[in-house]
Image (cartoon, coloured by chain):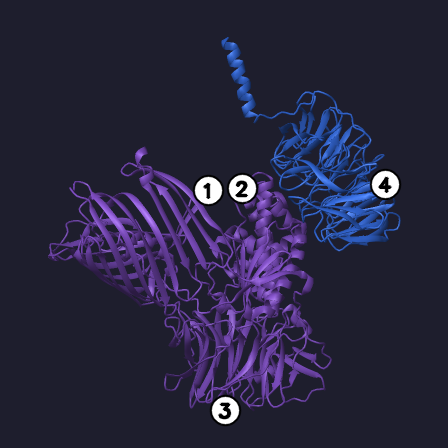
Chain colours: A blue, B purple
Amino acid sequence: MSLRICTFLLVCAVSLLNGCSGLRLGYPLRPGKNDTPTFAHTIGRVNALAVTILPPLTQVWEQDITAGIGSGSLLLVDSIIMVGNLRGELYALNAKTGKRIGWVTLGGSIEGAPVIDGDLVIVPVAGSHETLIGYDFLEGKARWKTALVDIQASPLLMDARVFVGNVSGRFTAVDRSTGETVWHFDLPGNTSLKGIRSSPAGADVNVVFGADDGRLYNLDARTGKVRWTFAADGAIQAGPSIADTTVYVGTLHGTMYAVGLTGGSLLWSHASGAAIYAPPLLHRGGCYVGTTGGVVIALDQRTGALLWSCDVHSPINAGIVAANAVLYVGTLRKELIAIDAAKGEILWKGGVSGRIKTTPVVGADRVFIATDDRLVQAFEGSVR
Amino acid sequence: MKRSFFTIPIVFVLLTVASTVHAQFFYFGRNKVQYTDFDWHVLRTEHFDIYYYADMKDLAERGAFFAEEAYGLLQVKFNHSLNARVPLIFYSSHLHFEQTNTTGGFIPEGVGGFFEFLKGRVVIPADGSIPQFRHVIRHELVHVFMHSKIGRVLTDHRKTQDRYPPLWFVEGLAEFWSTEWDEQAEMVMRDAVLNDIAVGLVDMDQIYGSFLMYKEGQNALKHLAARYGDEKVLLLMENFWKEASFNDVFRLTIGKGFREFDEEWLYALKKQYYPLLAVSDQPSQAAKRIVIEGFNAKPTVFEHDTTREVYFVGNRTGYTGIYKKSLNDPNPESPATNIIKGEQTDELEAFHPLRSRIDISRLGLLAFVTKSGEQDALHIYDVVTDDMINTFRFTQLVSIGSVSWAPDGKRVAFSAIDRGGQNDLYILNTDTRELRRLTDDTYDDRDPAWSPHGDKIAFVSDRTPFGKDGAYNLFLYDLASGDIEYLTYGKESAGSPAWSHDGSQLAFTCDAGGVNNIWVMNMQMPHPAGHRMMTRVSAFLTSAFDPAWTSSGDLVFTAFEKFSFRLQMIPHVQTVLDTSTTTMVLDVGAHGAPWEPQSLRGENEQERYKYRGEYSLDFAQSTISTDPVFGTSGGAFLSLSDVLGNEQYYFLLYNTAETQDELLSSFNIAISRISLSQRTNYAYGIYRFTGRRYDLTSKDEYYYERVFGGYFALSYPISKFDRIESGVSVSNSNREVDGAIEERKALLVSNSLAFTHDNSLWGPSGPLDGSRFNLTLAYTSDIQYSNVNYFSVIADYRSYIRLGQRSAFASRFWIFYNDGKESRRFVMGGSWDLRGYDRWSIRGEKLWLTSHELRFPFIDELAVRFPFFGLSFFSIRGALFFDAGSAWDTDYLQTLGSVGGGIRLNLGGVLVLRYDLGKRIEDNFNRFQDGLFHQFFFGYDF
C-alpha cells in the first residue's frame, strides 16, 4: 500500500513539475493534400492551397496558448493545429473545436514553424542549449535534441534531412531520424555576427536561403557545397519561395528579386519601398507579397511587372496564403483581410483582437490565424 | 525642487488631528504657477488624441500631420504598431509648457518635450520652428514605440517587465531615428573626442542624462548600423528578452559586449576627428580668451571713452544673470562682475541663455530678456548709472528672443513667439511703447540685427526650400519698403548676424564645413546681380556663436570647447579677411519658393471637441502591515487624474481592527480632490480615521481616537518664489486616553494662513544660496465642548550666504508658538534640528531654535577598486555647525545647544546620509558635555 501511495505521489509530483503538461497523440498524423505540415505549405514555400473559402468569414473558436507566437506559420495536419509559442511551448489543438489536446515545453522560445513528419515534429528553438528538437508525439517525448545555437527560422525537411540556419550565421543539415549533423556551412567573412533568420526553401538538390549579410545562398542539399550566391541590396530575413526554376525573395530594403534556381542570375527585381519580412506567395503566375509599407503587391512571376497594388494601411510582416482565388493576409492593424487574387481588390476585412504577425493557414474549411494577444483563432467562410 | 502643492495630501491627513505641529516639517518649495487660462480642445486623428488650446489651432493641425507622418515611418522602422491611442499634449511655447501639470516637477529650459509612462502622454512645446517641432514629435514618438515594442517583446516571451534598456540607448535611438546627424551633434562629438571627454558605453553613467549622452548614444547607434547592419538596431530590441543585462543582449546581437564595442567605436571616432587638427584649431588655441570660467554666452560690447567692456549672459553660481568684463583685462581667469542677478526675484525669474541675445546701445542702455510672470519681458538697464530704466511686457507675445537696438537708441527690434506659436520680428519704440510687427507668417524669423545706418534689419529665417530640413538663411529687411532680400541661399544654416560699426561688414555664423564658424559678408563690395560672397573668419574645430563687433574691428564671440561656453575674441578681423582663402559665392538670385508646412486636413481628422476632462487611474496599491504595538492593518490607495494633470482624486481605505467586532468601526476612509488648473490651486476632502495613536508631543501618551470631518485648502502663488496658503478644517474628534477616566470629545475648527518664500538654490546635500521663509498663523477651537482652544504661530527663516562656488554659510531661525487650551507641543532634537540630542526628545508648546552652519566640499571623489569591482563616492560634503534652542510649556527652563562637524553624502539624488560629531552645550549654556556625541541619520541640510 505504501509503495502505491509513494508512486502515486511521485507521479503527482512529476506532473506538477511538468506543469501538468504533455503532448502525446498516440497515433501518427496523416497529412492530406490540403494540409500544411511545414511552413508555407510546401518545401518550395508556395503557400497556395486548392481550397475555396470565401469571405465574409466568421470566427468559430479561439484558444489562448499563453504566450506570444512567432512569425512562422501554424501547422495543420490531420485536423490538428500545431503551434509553438515564444515561451518554448508546443501546443496541439483540435482544428475543429480549438480544444487543447496537449502541450509540452521544449525550450526558451519557438519563433519559426515546426515541421511535421509522420510521428515526429521537428521544432526550432531559441533561448536554450538544444535548439533543434525532434519530438516524438507518439511516445510523448523528445527523440533527439541538437545544440545548434538559437534558431529563429522555420526548418526545411527534404529527403530525410532537416535544413536550417541559426542566428550566428551557420546553416546546418541534420539527419531527420537522429538529429546528427550531416554538414554545416558558415557565412563567409562573418565578423559582424550576421545571422540566418530566413527560412530555407528546397527544390531537388537545391537548398536556398537568405542571410543578414544581404546574400541569397543556394547550397547542394547533399553536400552543403555552395552552388551559387546572389548579392541583394540588403539583409534578407524573409524566406525565399521557389516555383519552377526560379527563386523569389524580398529584402529588408524592400526589393523583390527573381533569381534563376540553376545559376543564380538575376531575372528581375522590383523595388517596393518598404521592408519585406515574409516569403512571397506564388500562385497562378503571380508573386504576391506584403510589405511593412502597408501594401500588398502582385508581380508577374515571369517578368516582375506590377499587376496590382493594394493598400491595406498597415505594415504586413507575415506571409500571405491563397485559397484558390482569394488571398488572406493579416496586418499589424489587427485585421484579417481577404483580397481578390486577380484584381487586388479588398473583398472583406475582419477586425481581430491582436496584431497578426504569423502567416495564416488555410485548410479543413477554415482559415487559422495567430494573434499577438496569444490567441489562435479559426474562421469559417463558404466552401464549394 | 518639489512643488509645494504635493504637501496637500499629507497636510490634509495632518489637519485631521487639528494640529499645525507637524506642519513644521513641510512647507517650503517653489511654485509652478498656472498663469494662463488654457482653452483646451481635443483633435482626434487615426492614432492620436491631440490636446491643444484654441490660440494654437493651426500649429496643432501641423503637429497632428507630423504625428501621423511619424507614426507611419516608425511602424515600419520598429516593425510594430501601437495598441492604444497616444495622448499628445501640445503647447505653443516653452513658457506655456512650463505650466503643465502632466508632471509635478519644474521643467528646465533645455527640456524639449517628454514622454511619461504613467498615462503614456507625450507633452511637446513648440519654439517657433516648425521643423524642430516635427523633430521633437518624432523623437518622442520613438520613445513611445520603443516602450511598446520592448513591452511586447517581454510579454510575448512571458518575461516580467522588470528591465529596460539603458538611457543612452533610449535617447540615442530617439535621436538616431528622428533626425539626421547635424552640426550641433558634430560639434558635441568633436569636442568630446578631441578633449578626452568622450566616454564609452561602459562608462555612460558618468555623463548620465546629459546632452553629450544623447549625442554619444546617437553616434554609437550610427556606428553600429554602419558597421554591423541597420537590422541590428531593431534586433537589439527584439533580442531584449534573452538576457537580463543589456551588455549581454548587445553581445549576442553583434558579437561584442560594451567594452569591445567601445574599443572599436572610440577608435573610429579618433580616426575621424584627429586629422581635423591639421586644418582646424580649438578656439582656445586660435583666439584670445576673455572669460573661460562658468557659462558665458550672448556677448555685446560697450565702449565709452577708454572703457571697453563686454556684457554677456553668464552663470557661475547656479543663478544666471548679466555679467561684464573689461576687454582690456589680459587675464581670462579673472572673474567677471555680476551686474544683474537673475533667477531670484519675480521680475527676473529666468534667463534664456541659449536663445536670447542681448544688445547695448551707444549710450549704454542694455536691452535683455527674462521670463517675468506669464510671459517674457524686455528690460532696459542703464549700465552707466546701474539702474533698471524700463520693463516692457506684451500680452499677445509669450516668448521673446534676441534683441537689437536701432542706431537712434530709441527703438528695439526683437523676435517673439505669439500665443499661436509663430515666431516673427517686431520693433518697439521705447518712448511711445508702440509695437510694430514686421513679419507675420509661419516661418521662424530670428536674431534681428539693426544696421548702423538704421534702414535695414538683418535676420535669419527658414523661409527657403531648405527650411523644411531646419536650415536658416540670412535675409535683409528693408524698413522703408518692407521688402525681404536674400543674403544667403542654401542648405548651410546661418545665425546671429552682427553689423560692424560702420555698417560695411556683416558677421554671422554658418555651419558650412560641418560646424558653426564665423563668416563675414562685405555689404559694400559690389557683387554680380543675384550673388553674394561670404568669407570665413574662423576655422574652429568645435563651434563659434553670437559674434559681436568692437569699434576697432575685433569680434567677440561665444566659443564651445570642453563642453563649456566661453567668451573669446578674434582681433583685427580685417587682417584675417585679407588673408582668408575660404570664401563662398552664393547664388541668391534664382531662389526657389519657400517650403510650405503641411497640415492635417479633412479625412485624416476624425473628431474635434472641447475638452471636458478625461480621467484614468494613475495608481492603485493595496497593503497589509503588522506592528507589535498597533497590530495589523490593511487597505488600499487609489489615485485618478485627468489627462492634463489638472484635476486629481485620491481615495484611501484601510482597516485597523484588532478584533472581529471592531471591524466595522475601524474603517478609515479619506477622499480628496486637488485642482491645479487655475492659478489658485485648491483642495478639499472628507475623512474618517479611527485607531490607536501615540502622541509623541506628550509624555508617552497612548490614546484611541475616532475623528471624522472635512477640509478645504487654498494655495495662491504670487510668483514662482512666493505664495499664500490658507486652510480650514472641521473635525469631530473623540479621544480615549489610556488611563483617563473620561473620553475627550471635541468639534474642532482649525483655520490657518501662511506666507512662504523660497528662492533657494540647492547643492548636493542642501541649499547653498538664496533664502526661505515661512510665517504661519493658525487658530484651533472646539466649538461644541470648549475642550480645545489655542492659537499657533510658526516663523521659520533660513538664509544661505554664498561664500564660494560650493560653499555657503547657512542660518536658520525658528519660533514656534502654541498657546491655549490643549495646545499642541512642538518637537525638536536630532540630526535635523538641535543636533546632539535624541530625536524629538525636546518638546514644548513654545519652541525656538537657531542654527548656523558652514557648508563646504570635503571629498570630491572617494574610490575603492577591488579586483572584481569598484566603489566610488562623489561630492562628500562637510559641515561645521552651531545649534541653540529650547522648548517649554509655561516656564522657560534652560537653553540647549551643540557644536560640531559632520559629513554628508548624497546617494544617487535619492537619499542624503549624514553623520555629525560634536559636543552638547549643557546646563543652560554653562558647560560642554563630557565626551562627544555622534549621530547618523538621513535627510537634506536645512
Label 4 sits on residue: A243
Label 3 CA crowd tier, 10 Å (few <14, some 14–19, many 20+): few
Q: Which chain carries label 2?
A: B
Q: In this view, does B93 lie above or below B839?
A: below
Q: Which chain carries label 1?
A: B
Which amino acid, mark 2? Answer: Ala
Quarter of the image for residue B174 reads: bottom right
**Disc sitting over residue B868 in the figure:** 1
Q: Which chain carries label 3?
A: B
Q: Quadrant of the N terminus of chain B?
A: bottom left
Tally of numbered tags: 4
Badges 4 and 1: C-beta atoms under 8 Å apart? Answer: no
Which amino acid, mark 1? Answer: Phe
3D distance between C-alphas at marks 3 and 2: 67 Å
Position in image of residue B223 (x %, y %) = 63, 55
Q: Which of B374 and B207 is in front in this view?
A: B374
**Disc sitting over residue B408 in the figure:** 3
3D distance between C-alphas at marks 4 and 3: 83 Å
- Looking at the image, residue B525 sits to the left or right of residue B624; the answer is right
3D distance between C-alphas at marks 1 and 3: 70 Å
